[in-house]
Image: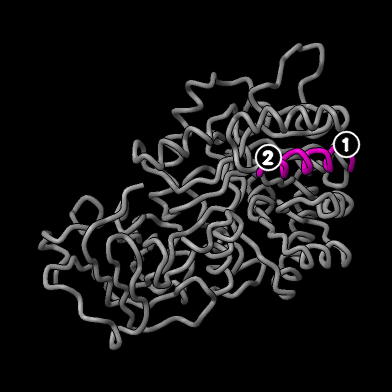
Amino acid sequence: MKLATGTTLIHHGQLIDGTGAPPVPDAAVVVTDGIITYAGPAADAPPVPEGAARIDARGGTILPGLIEAHIHLTYFNVTELQDLDIKFPVEYVTLQSAVNAKTALECGYTAARSGGCLHNIDVWMKKAIEEDMIPGPRLSASGREICGAGGLMDWNPDYRKIGMEGIVFIVNGPEEARKAVRKLVKDGIEWVKTYPTGDAASPDINDHHTLCMTFDEMHAVVQTAHNHGLKVTGHCRATEGIRNALKAGYDAIEHGTFMDDECLELLLKRHVPMCPGLGFEKFSVDRGKEFGLSQQVIDGHQETLEAGAESCRRVLAAGGTMGLGGDYGFGWTPHGTYAQELTFFVDYVGFSVLDTIRCATLGGAKMMGREAEIGSVEPGKLADVLVVAGDVMRDISILEDRANLLAVMQGGVVKAGSLAGRGADTRSNENTKD
Ligand SMILES: [Zn+2]
């Protein structure tokens, strides 16, 4: 991804740097050739060259680009999982993914970690974004997922004779688990996404208390993936599924819903980050009826919502690492509504605004393994910066409305927001000068 050239000064705003530090009221951020070279009080800022571009934050907020820690670019606002593998061919899903990537960037998400994808679209989407062929968040690629036979993702009855190659490897035993990972190695992915447990979405046979993989299968996945330098994560709701994942050597936990003391201890000891993806539960409860979810499914989501919120509060209090985001791309959580996750964490889960932003920026960068480059507004990092009209400390929900974004910067280039396309990233634009 190309970096900006020259110097840009962002000023007249408060700075929330993403580390959890208190806001700096009258701040300045200096970007030189796409890299942040100063971030702090405007009074202490170094002088910038005569022709430097200037972005006036208009009394608003300067913060790191948001990071979606569990994105599904290939999900196209489906109402049931079954829609994913039978509705459209790979060609059309790829186009939809490109549109979703652009939407994510326009919403202020400058980076994203995939939580699983159809076919092998993430890998190529990542390449296209990195080469500036299409706009989108810097992507951490996942691939086709892995689930035990009869588990959550093995939903097609045998009589339909529908294969699942485009979405998930259905495995029976460690040998098949190894075989699936080896295919993913060749695909070029970074994250192997597995299904250690079921979900409220599938009551009776694969609910949130059901295991969908054996420990041996999970361990085989980890051994094979780590041998090839890949990381492993899993959809973990049931306590035993979380425990199995942590003991098998998983590199991250998705959801971590029913986290007991032993699991929490293991999570902290092994420094495993977690992406709760919890807003989905709340929005399923609130909007499920209008999308035809059964009362049983809604009740299950209510149970995971409450347990998940408690897990998040415990992980936060214990100093664990969390990224925010998750499972946008369903009918009731459509692409473009990602930032409601932040409002939900403040209003429902009870996180402070600063903790929420830290998780949604630096936390996500840590989950991606890229915290040295992105995730906070600090000198030396890539200038992936958001400039927002309004006080995010007072009302975090202003992030939900794209109209409030003045600038969405990647590597110092203004890619979206109302100042995009007006040359705010060049030295020659009169509009952006004082
Ligand atoms: Zn997911």
Residue 151 lies in quadrant: top right
The residue under label 1 is which amino acid type? Asp
Q: Magenta residues?
A: 214-229
Q: Residues within 10 Å of mark 2 (few under 14, many from 20)?
A: few
Marks 1 and 2 sit apart, C-alpha to C-alpha, by 37 Å
Say which mark, if any, is on residue 301: none
Q: Which residue position holds label 1?
A: 204
Residue 383's image quarter? bottom left
**Dominant secondary structure (helix, strand or loop) of the stretch shown in magenta:** helix
Residue under label 2, please give it.
228
Q: Is residue 387 left or right of residue 150?
A: left
Asked if disc 1 is less than 8 Å from ligand 1, the answer is no
Which of discs 1 and 2 lies nearer the camera? The answer is 2
In the rendered structure, the answer to whether residue 123 lies left or right of residue 79 reads: left
Residue 192 coordinates in the image, percent (x, y): 68, 40
> Is the CB of mark 2 within 8 Å of ligand 1?
no
Q: Any magenta on residue 217?
A: yes
- Say whether residue 43 is left or right of residue 266: left
Residue at point 38%, 63% (across, down): 385
SS category of the residue bearing label 1: loop
Residue 28: give x, y in percent of width and height: 31, 77
User: In this rendering, is residue 75 above or below 378?
Assistant: above
Label 2 amino acid? His
| Along the line of sight, the residue nearer the viewer: 32 or 410 | 32
Kindly identify the residue that appears in the image at 45 percent across and 53 percent down: 109
